[in-house]
Amino acid sequence: YRYFDCKDDALFALIEHTLAEYMSFNAPSVKVPRTLARELERFFSFWYEKREFLDTFAKNDMLSQISECAIKFPLFDSISISRFLPDEDDTTRKKIFEFTICGLIFLVLEWYNHGFDTSIEDMAKLSCRMISQPLFPNLDKIDIRP
């Protein structure tokens, strides 16, 4: 605590350190084709291994702070989202990316709160579906006028 003004500042620093750790964890060491499913399995594996970290934040009633830090974390430095959203402007890309990160962190926290009751593989499949398919595929066919 010598380096922080309060406990919350120390916990925020721990979150940022953990997010940076994920970036190095996520760098594949073997040249295996990267797929969305594999990347999501790595994501959920990482958080499953961080159970004690999540316990610390749960005990301090600060689990929601993880999503806040994840949104602000400079992931853009290591991920070229323009590759995934080539037809969007930078502002739109950033918002879509933040929305996706929030959703993934929310899934991790719900998974944690339910005692990791779903396999890593099933969490990756669920997330893959959520990211790669439209939420409302037939919305253009639905009359939503009041």
Image: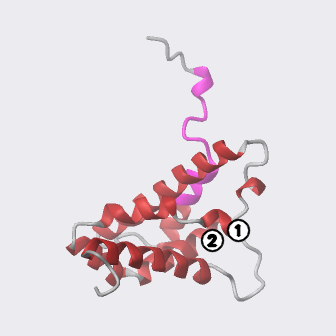
Q: Main secondary structure of the magenta part?
A: helix
Q: How many marks?
A: 2
Asked whether the beta carbons under mark 1 and mark 2 sit within 8 Å of each other, the answer is: yes
Counting from the top left corner in percent of width and height, residue 89 is at 73, 42
Q: Quadrant of residue 4?
A: bottom left
Q: Secondary structure at mark 2?
A: helix
For the residue pair 49 and 102, the one nearer the viewer reads as 102
Q: Quick one: quadrant of the N terminus? A: bottom left
Counting from the top left corner in percent of width and height, residue 27 is at 66, 81
Counting from the top left corner in percent of width and height, residue 97 is at 59, 53
Q: Quadrant of residue 5?
A: bottom left
**Amino acid at dot 1:** Thr
**Magenta segment includes 37:** no
**Magenta segment includes 135:** yes
Q: Residues within 10 Å of mark 2 (few under 14, many from 20)?
A: some
Please give the range of residues in magenta.
127-141
Q: Which residue is mark 2?
A: 39
Q: Quick one: quadrant of the C terminus? A: top left
Task: Identify the residue shown where x is 64% and y is 51%.
Answer: 132
Is residue 47 at all visible to an observer of this figure?
yes
Residue 28 lies left or right of residue 146; in this view the side is right
Q: Which residue is mark 1?
A: 35
The answer for how far apart the CA atoms under marks 1 and 2 are is 6 Å
Q: Residues within 10 Å of mark 1 (few under 14, many from 20)?
A: few
